[in-house]
Amino acid sequence: MNLIAKNWDLIIIDHLESAYACRSSNSPVVYISHNRESTLISQKIPNAPSWIQKILTAWIDHYEKKTVKTVNAVITISSDEANWYRLFNSLVIILPPTFNSTVTPVKPRKDGRLRIGFLGGSKWKPNRDAMELLLLHILPLSQRPIELVIAGSDWSMPLLQSQLQKSIGDDRVALRYMGYIDDINKFWTDVDVFAAPIANGAGVNVKVCEALSNARPVIAYPHAMRGLKGIDQSFVFLASNPIEFAQALDSFDFAAITNNPPHEFTPSYAKSKLSDLLQTIISRF
């Protein structure tokens, strides 16, 4: 293969399966990890027998450890997973997902409602669970006028409206469904705060990272913030149950909205971290 035959200055592999292609290369290798793959087996094949899941988990865990030991550096988006990688490799950097786009200014509010953003399609179970939490358990406890702005495919608005009507029974909460949108800026410009009542799923929540990259404050369950440590607390409001989540919505101050995202979620931060990493590899190799 070309990766093995040629003497590259640097090889960057994206995802675990790419490691096989450069197993015999003499060039330095950087492994970009999106998740610890061995933790995702039950999520990727939920209907497989448990014994098959256990075998695959053990095999991938072994291959993952071997890969991390042999590469020159690891880039991970998760501070939690970085601790595991450092057991096998001393050069690990944390680089949250960064979206190279201009921060979208918030449109003025017409009716004073707090506009809560929800991003994701209904086919993914963690999204369905989060939507159910919002409509049936969180929003009924909030006392302020709210507009829930939903972007994502396959949601049934009649069903969502019916659930909301049963749980609240008045017009204090309005729903607006944007469907699947090609231009995500159209979503962010109509959102004051991003809601992430995520209680399950694996890995870093990329939607939370996208909200922070767009300088939108996030109200979230702790699970939604897994792997994201040390973020400016003026952007993140944690709630451990529906009551605390509703209280965070009620106390949210529009003054918390800014056009300046946390430093860790800016392109300049990513460029600086990558530049430092490359210099370190060059000096060692």
Image (cartoon, rainbow, N blue to C red):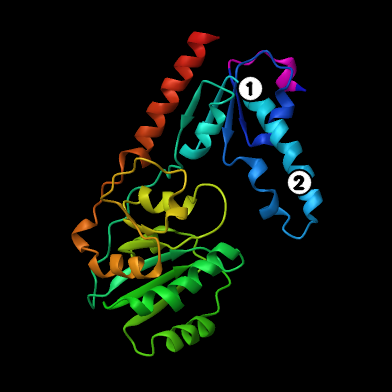
Q: In this rendering, is residue 64 above or below 193?
A: above
Q: Can you identify the residue that label 1 sits on? A: 69
Q: Nearer the viewer, mark 1 or mark 2?
A: 2
Residue at 52 percent of width and 20 percent of height: 90
Q: Tell me if 13 is positioned left or right of 130 in this view.
A: right
Q: Which mark is residue 54?
A: 2
Q: Residue furthest left?
A: 255
Q: Along the polypeptide, which appears first: circle 1 or circle 2?
A: 2
Residue 227: image x %, image y %? Answer: 46, 43
Tell me if residue 154 is in the magenta stretch.
no
Badge 2 marks a residue whose secondary structure is helix
Instruction: Tell me if I can see residue 78 in this picture.
Output: no
Q: Please, what is the three-letter code of the amino acid marked with disc 2? A: Lys
The boundaries of the magenta stretch are: 2-9
Residue at 60 percent of width and 65 percent of height: 125
Q: Please, what is the three-letter code of the amino acid marked with disc 1? A: Lys
